[in-house]
Image (cartoon, helix red, strand yellow):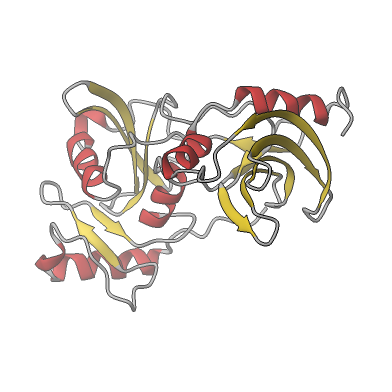
Amino acid sequence: MNKEKLFTKEQLTQIIKLAEGDSSYIGGDTLDGDATEISILTVSKQNNLIFTEGNKDTGFTHLRNRHNYFSYINYWKLDDVGLNKLDKPSKFHPKMMPIIDFVKIADHIYDPENKNITRNSKPNSFDKYTGEYIYDTNHTETYHLILYKDTKVVHTMFPQSKKMNSKIRTKYGKGIVTVSTKLPEFTHDLVVPYENNKHVAVFSILIRKYLKELKERSYIQKHDEVGKVIGSVLLGERSIDFSDRFSNEFMQQMQTGDLIHFENVINKLDRGEIKN
């Protein structure tokens, strides 16, 4: 497992000096094309919290990739016996704007009374603030804000609850839904991959529209160690019109929705209870 790439003391000093020397960062939310991981994305208006561009392990890039509702990156962690296990980081409300609302939440819960009221796993490196925020009048949630120790530089922030997470009932991570059309076969395919910790598909859902036959068939596909399809199980068939195509709404439903019936078959295939 690769070591976390956190900001060094020298980088933190640079970030703080830049933020304190340029008031235009306050309330800003843009970066130019030459941004680096220590570039400042914005400084909050109320408490001057500093959001940096960051990288996959810290800053806004980490926060967005790991906790934004519409991020579909799969994360893995080691379980108690040292095996890779799918991690399920909590997600923000789908209607929240990834920088605007996140900054509002951070400003709201940054309060001395909220400091370290829940367990801080790295107290020598970070300060932790925990508090509630009400969004859209009826969504109250507890959030954790993590700052670099004795600074206002944001390491990350996330909801405590996982109630916004998509339900996944397999040990594999759901990948990005794709749609493609093949000619001259006249097929229209939707594929939902289920990946291992190496980001290689082990199983996948295939929904294929056979436009010549006016039929749609659903399959679970099995893949080899490099992701090549080596077998499939037919789940069902229905009649369609020639003009029938996969809508954006249906793709989003397959990406974020509960696919329990498909995933139950994947689990049975994985356990050898069904032969492909």
Name above or below for residue 242 compared with residue 60. above
Residue nearest the observer in this picture, 113 or 63: 63
Most distant residue in the bottom direction: 34
Name above or below for residue 264 compared with residue 175. above
The picture quadrant where one finds residue 215 is: top right
Count of residue discs: 0
Res 83 seen here: no
- Left or right position of 182 against 178: right
Name above or below for residue 77 compared with residue 150. above
Q: Position of residue 166 (x, y in %)?
A: 49, 31
Q: Position of residue 52 (x, y in %)?
A: 31, 60
- Left or right position of 115 against 164: left
The picture quadrant where one finds residue 42 is: bottom left
- Which quadrant would the C terminus be assigned to in this image? top right
Residue nearest the observer in this picture, 27 or 154: 27
Q: Residue at x 80, y 56 (%)?
A: 226
Q: Residue at x 24, y 41 (%)?
A: 106
Q: Position of residue 194 (x, y in %)?
A: 67, 41
The picture quadrant where one finds residue 10 is: bottom left
Res 23 seen here: yes
Q: Residue at x 25, y 22 (%)?
A: 140
Q: Position of residue 136 (x, y in %)?
A: 18, 29
Q: Residue at x 83, y 51 (%)?
A: 225
